[in-house]
Amino acid sequence: MENESKNDRFKRVAERRTRAVLRDMRILGNCGNKGNYSYSPDQVRRIFLEIDQAVKEARGKFHLPRDKEFKL
């Protein structure tokens, strides 16, 4: 890995981290089982607001260009 290109390193690290996030999201989904857990709609809303905010912040770090300029 000493001679690994930045792109190869990105792919290796991003794939591993993405798999971990997706695995954790599936595990979080298990909390939706009403037979094992009790929760309020507000608790669920707060969880997903936090996740949505984290996704927005992570996406923003990639400096992706806008598809097109907004015009009225």
Image: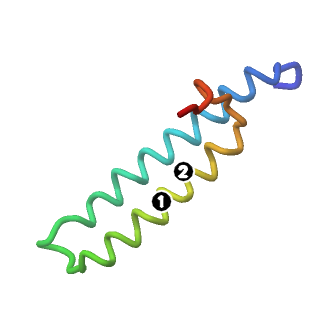
Where 38 sits versus 32, above or below?
Answer: below
Q: Assess disc 1: are there few (<14), some (14-19) or many (≥20) residues with their C-alpha within 10 Å of its C-alpha.
A: few
On residue 5, the disc is: none
Quadrant of the rendering where the N terminus is positioned: top right
Residue 32, x across and y down, in percent: 22, 65
Residue position marked by numbered label 1 in the rendering: 51
Q: Is 2 or 36 nearer to us in this picture?
A: 36
- Tags 2 and 1 touching, CB below 8 Å: yes
- Tell me the quarter of the picture where residue 40 sits: bottom left
Q: Which residue is at a point 40% across and 63% down the rendered structure image?
A: 48
Q: Identify which amino acid the numbered label 2 is placed on.
A: Val
Structural distance between the alpha carbons of marks 2 and 1: 6 Å
Q: Which residue is at a point 35% across and 60% down the rendered structure image?
A: 28
Where 29 sits versus 70, above or below?
Answer: below
Q: Assess disc 2: are there few (<14), some (14-19) or many (≥20) residues with their C-alpha within 10 Å of its C-alpha.
A: few
Does dot 2 land on a helix, a strand or a loop?
Answer: helix
5 left or right, relative to 54? right
- Tell me the quarter of the picture where residue 53 sits: bottom right
Residue 44, x across and y down, in percent: 31, 70
On residue 55, the disc is: 2
Residue 50, x across and y down, in percent: 49, 65
Q: Is 42 or 27 nearer to us in this picture?
A: 42
Q: Which residue is at a point 43% across and 53% down the rendered structure image?
A: 24
